Amino acid sequence: MKTKHRNAFLLAALAALTLSGACTTDDAPHGSDADDLHGSPITFTATIPATAPAAAPSAAPPATRTTPDGDRWLPTDRVGITVSPTAGTVFTPVDNKPYRVDGLTTPAASATLAPDDGTPLRYPREGSLDIMAYYPYDTNATYGRISLDLTDQSDPAALDVMMAKVANVSQSQSPVRLSFRHISAKVTLNVTAGTGLTAGDISALTGADVSAGPIVAHVDIELKTEAWSEKGQQSINLYKSATPSEGVHATFSAIIPPYFTPNIPITFQIGGREYTCTLTSTDRFLAGNNYIYPVTVNDNGIRLGTPAITAWDVQGSAAATVPTLEVVRIPAGKFLMGSSDGSNPGDRDGSGLNTTPAEPHRFDNETQHWVELTKDFHMGKYLVTNAQYVEFLNAKGVVKETITDGNLIGPGGQCTWGENDGQPMFFADGYTIEWDDATSKWVPGAGRKKHPVVYITWYGAYEYAAWAGGTLPTEAQWEYACRAGKANHPFGVGTGYRLDNTLANFDWEFSWDWDGSSPAATTPNTGTSPRGIQAVGSYPPNAWGLYDMHGNVREWCLDSQADYPTDTTKDKPAKDPVKPGSNRVLRGGHYLSQGQACRSAYRNYSTAPRSASYEFGFRVVFPAP
């Protein structure tokens, strides 16, 4: 799709729109039964979260979606909407109906949408609809399909297609919330002159001098399924930013289809010579990500650095502001997950399992098994703090509202974008995170910037991790990192056999001590514990430099608490396991837990992903290059 729209679109980390829609009266069958088939008209609203102080109302509209003075709608903006009936609904589909931005607020961070032809979409009186929307509107889009031609990168805004959808929409007075998101990926080259070339050689390059490909450059996109279909490959010239990124001589970028290829050939034409390199990505260039490569062109070839992966904007060379989290590199490796039941002394069956004495206080769901993590990864050195989490909330424009959809009822915030749209993310207890009415922003509780954020649902943890460019650890990654090389030890800190008031924040009246061979452990009283959450890093790290893996707050994992496998051996381990299931597991114990519940293998806690508690926190993992 090549729409000559000169506005860059929403930043992927901030994009969220609220829409609702259905069938038009013009689509109703003519005759006496038309009123029986069509209900009330649907009003559409659209919001863009503000990320910075707004410009004065008299200021000229910004030239791009993402600007220093915030994101806003323009009166020229239009979206295309397609509605279709769900099973059993009598309804004539409406394809690619244009709606325009109308009723702008001041500042223009939100708007209502009105039909171009003045005829609103309507709900069916009975049944439900699937609604799909995309931006910018294209008159040539038909039956939920749009075509995209990426060969001309001179106007990135015209290629930055966003889309959103919601299923099974029934007649309601409330608007249907749709979250628009970037459906392409972006690559950025920050280029500097190396040995044998000058800054002038690089700064003089134009987009015609830098090409990518051949790549998939012609595609069709099915809005309903979000399926991409390749229609042709071609080399493309990159877009040159008017102002290079700081510290480099030129910045080039291209919008590309996601998923198709992990490798992109790049060619520079400089002074009659050709310089080549190949961009690579282990995740096959995911939608909404900007892969920023440092490139040094030397006389004898190109040196290509490891890309930074961030959210992206269309026109500028700068990436979206995302947090910088302190991380520790965790090496790939094989380990014994779970705890020994002592049933295989001397390794009689040759499996290498359960060869040590049974770990006291173990549970049946701690079945020992072999796991291999095949790739290094980075893990947050600390739990995510209140200060870091409010940065995310404010960047995403999450507002205070009453949450009734989790296990708690009260003030908090919900997700308004992507696959978890409408899910509760956190509850504000007025102590860890607060809403500041004066600034309409979230702020950390007084004196608690460095305390781990709690009252977080799995959705809230997952969305923060995604915003930061990572994800939540799998249960296997978490336990492997917690143990930090201490195989068959109950703890990853100290000697590995004892947890007391010098090592972690938990209920010290029930500390834990074991000699590694006796049938039972002792539970000595080592003092009166703080009985409250402590700032991250208040106790010693484990051998790999990770803090608070035992106690303080429980930590959400990516996967569920499904049963462990029983058929692994050292030579046939479970590789990179991610366990399916509807609930999610939390690990590590918390500040009121007894020592035995803080063991590395302890996993006796899982809950629905919508649940939140004073003891639920998380940390983030990232792929390691």
Image (cartoon, rainbow, N blue to C red):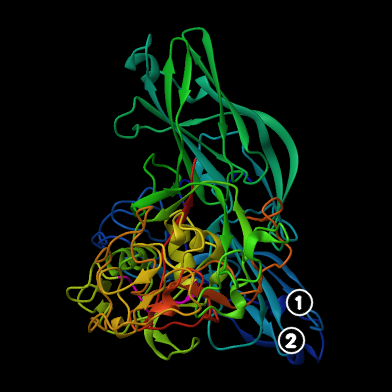
Q: In percent of the image, x 51 and y 7: which residue is there? A: 272
The residue at the far left in this view is 447
Label 1 sits on residue: 85
Displayed quadrant of residue 52: bottom left
Label 2 sits on residue: 127
Q: Element type at marker 1? A: strand
Displayed quadrant of residue 260: top right
The magenta stretch spans residue 453 = yes
Q: Where is residue 356 in the image (x, y as percent from the top left)?
A: 56, 65
Q: Element type at marker 2? A: loop
Give the residue type at disc 2.
Answer: Gly
Q: Position of residue 36 (x, y in %)?
A: 76, 92
Mark 1 packing: few (<14 Cα in 10 Å), some, or many (20+)? many
Q: Can residue 353 be seen in this view?
A: no
Q: Is residue 407 visible?
A: yes
Q: In percent of the image, x 29 and y 52: which residue is there? A: 68
Please determine whether, in this image, residue 323 is positioned above or below residue 564.
Answer: above
Please determine whether, in this image, residue 126 is positioned above or below residue 115.
Answer: below
Q: Where is residue 354 in the image (x, y as percent from the top left)?
A: 62, 66
Decide: marks 2, 1 in contact (CB < 8 A)? Answer: yes
Nearer to me, 563 or 65 = 563
- Apparent side of residue 426 relative to residue 487 in the rendered image (left or right): left
The part of the chain drawn in magenta is 452-458
Mark 2 packing: few (<14 Cα in 10 Å), some, or many (20+)? some
